[in-house]
Image (spheres, helix red, strand yellow):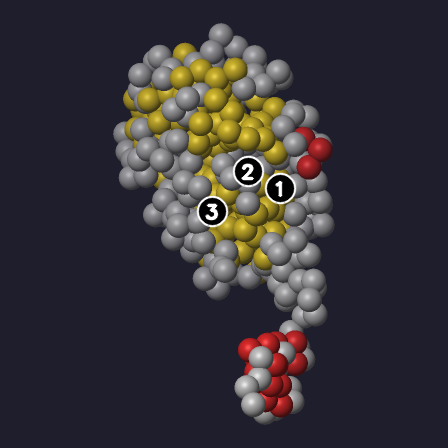
Amino acid sequence: MTLPKQASAIIICFAIVSVIPMGCGSPSQNTNPNDPKPGEPRSGEAGDGVKELKPRASLTYDEKGTSYRVSISADGKTAAVRGDAENDTVQLWDLTNMKRLHTIKSNTEMVFPVVLSRDGKTVAYTQGGWDIPLVDVASGKPGKSLRQNEFTVSHHLEFTPNGESVVSISGKELVGWDAMNEKPKFAIKADEKEVRTMSNLFDNGTKVATGHEDGTVKLWSLPNDKPLLTIPAHKQAVQKVAVAEDGKTIATRAFEEDLIIWDVVTGKQVRSIPSKELPFKVVPFRFLDNERLAYSDRQVTVIVEEARGGKKQFRLPGHSQDVYDIASSADGKVLLTCGGDKTIKVWDLKD
């Protein structure tokens, strides 16, 4: 007798199922009891799948003051930290063993910058409003000093990649200094009013962006005195500017406004991070490489995400008060943050 094709198929399926051992026929029966249940985040992940990291170390700046500015060497092994006006010292740290190397007393009534050279051998900061001491990191002793007799106080400093020059904001001007000869190399009048902020140097230290009182952002090729590009970025004074190393993407923010990502080639907005997601006052942010941006959100958590696409890669909870500054190693794998909780967090960005 010949069975219909449908009946044959049923008999074959029944035979196959009948010889499958119990516990092997369903993926749900072959899982590790320690694995999360469907819909639950895995260890180290938030509910949205973004990986949460814990700091490698938490350093204490000082019981009497707050860490306000941080800088890190290119290799991620040395850090410089500067406090607020209440306890204005510059601290140098060895991040390989988390030991403080030196503490340097400054003399400034306001909060001003601190920056390490890429090789981590020299630290520069402002002192007394008019000087930029260059301190040897190994000894903690000052060496050369850039005296700003003809310039106003610098509130932003950046070393060129070779460490031979320093670029600063001094009032209305961008000033380039010869760190070896302790003399200014150029001075560019960047605005009729005081320049509000300056980005990191990029394109091998040859370019910089500045933020202005009228809400514009200007891109400069140093030492040329004409901007390459002017972007009408904000309605209010620009608070902060950061640029990707390849110079193709700029991030800007003004007080109580969105953090905006711009395309340098077109001068047009790519996307924005809404102001409601950001801290009310200070919003630290910086590019880790050509693609990723790190910034602090309103929950005082540092977020690492694709600057143009917005896809989040890491979430870094750890600070209990506002995050004031962010620095990263040259390869973007070591992150340094400081905040109002008087701590400096060291993070390893690993998948």
Q: Name the secondary structure under disc 2.
A: strand
* Cβ atoms under marks 3 and 1 closer than 8 Å: no
Using the image, tell me which numbered label, if any, was put on residue 285.
2
Are the residues at dot 1 and dot 2 in contact (C-beta closer than 8 Å)? yes
Marker disc for residue 296: 1
User: Alpha-carbon neighbours of circle 1 within 10 Å: few (<14), some, or many (≥20)?
Assistant: many
Residue 288 visible to the viewer: yes
- Inspect the image, locate mark 3, and give the three-letter code of the amino acid beneath it: Ser
Q: Can residue 340 be seen in this view?
A: no
Q: Quadrant of residue 109?
A: top right
The amino acid beneath tag 2 is Phe
Nearer to the camera, 206 or 292: 292
Which mark is on residue 262?
none
**Residue at (44, 21) in percent of width and height:** 267
Measured as percent of width and height from the top left, residue 46 is found at: 66, 57
Disc 2 or 3, which lies upstream in sequence? Answer: 2
Q: Distance from label 1 to label 2 (Cα)? A: 7 Å
Residue 212 located left or right of residue 119: right
Identify residue type, mark 1: Ser
Instruction: Please say if 93 is above or below 15.
Output: above
> In the rendered image of this protein, does residue 278 appear above or below residue 43?
above
Q: Where is residue 176 in the image (x, y as percent from the top left)?
A: 35, 24
Distance in Å between CA atoms under marks 2 and 3 = 11 Å
